[in-house]
Amino acid sequence: MKTAILSLFLVILLAPSATAQKRVHAKDMEGTTWQMVFDLKKEADNAIERIALSAVGGFMDEIDIRFDFRKDGALRVRVEAFDEEDDDEFSTWDVNDAGQLTLGESDSFSSDDTVFMRDGDRLAAFEQKRGKLVRKDSIYLVRVNN
């Protein structure tokens, strides 16, 4: 009986860490390219919002934003919208002591208080709200094969 209770206690104690996001390491980012994905459907709370966000989502599908992470914190942001020529912008990136990826601002991208943390093969976006990190399910980064 004691073994079963101890096992149950360990499962309850370790379960949150199994679903927790993992730290980002700067060495893993250098030389990689990531694409920003907007999944706006997850933001909808009702049918009207789903319809509106589906229309906006179709619009967002025409925008391709890619981040090329270079050494020494240099970041190239490539934006292609509506089959127009790519627009390259330059910014910075950093991984803080908590293992959170932060992106500098560019003409097309403003990160505000957004940080990214590893979630499987994605980099999930989080925002600081009331002193806590809150996941933004509608935005994430996926690695593009180089």
Image (cartoon, grey):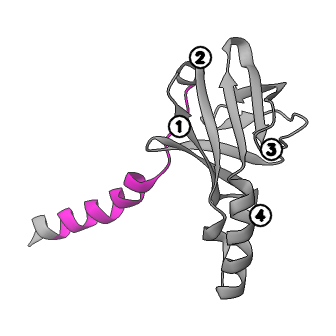
Residue 90 in percent (x, y) is at 83, 23
Alpha-carbon span between mark 4 and mark 2: 34 Å
In this figure, which residue is indicated by the disc labeled 1? 23
Q: Amino acid at mark 3?
A: Ser
Tag shown at residue 130: 4
Q: Which residue is the site of mark 3?
A: 111
Residue 104: horizontal and vertical position, in percent?
Answer: 82, 32
Q: Is there a contact, CB below 8 Å, between mark 4 and mark 1?
A: no
Query: What main secondary structure does the magenta stretch of the protein show?
Result: helix
**Which residue carries the number 2 mark?**
31
Residue type, label 4: Arg
Residue 138 appears at what percent x and percent y? 64, 60
Q: Nearer the viewer, mark 4 or mark 2?
A: 2
Examine the structure image and report whether residue 17 is included in the region drawn in magenta: yes
Q: Nearer the viewer, residue 140 or 53?
A: 53
| Quadrant of the image containing the N terminus | bottom left
Q: Specify whether 119 is left or right of 91.
A: left
| Closer to viewer: mark 4 or mark 1 | 1
Tell me which label, 4 or 3, sits earlier in the chain: 3
What residue is rendered at 65% in x and 31% in y?
A: 97
Q: Is residue 131 visible?
A: no
| Amino acid residing under circle 1 | Arg
Q: Earlier in the sequence, mark 3 or mark 1?
A: 1
Q: Amino acid at mark 2?
A: Gly
Per the model, the C-alpha gap separating discs 3 and 1 is 18 Å
- Element type at mark 2: loop
The CA distance from mark 3 to mark 2 is: 21 Å
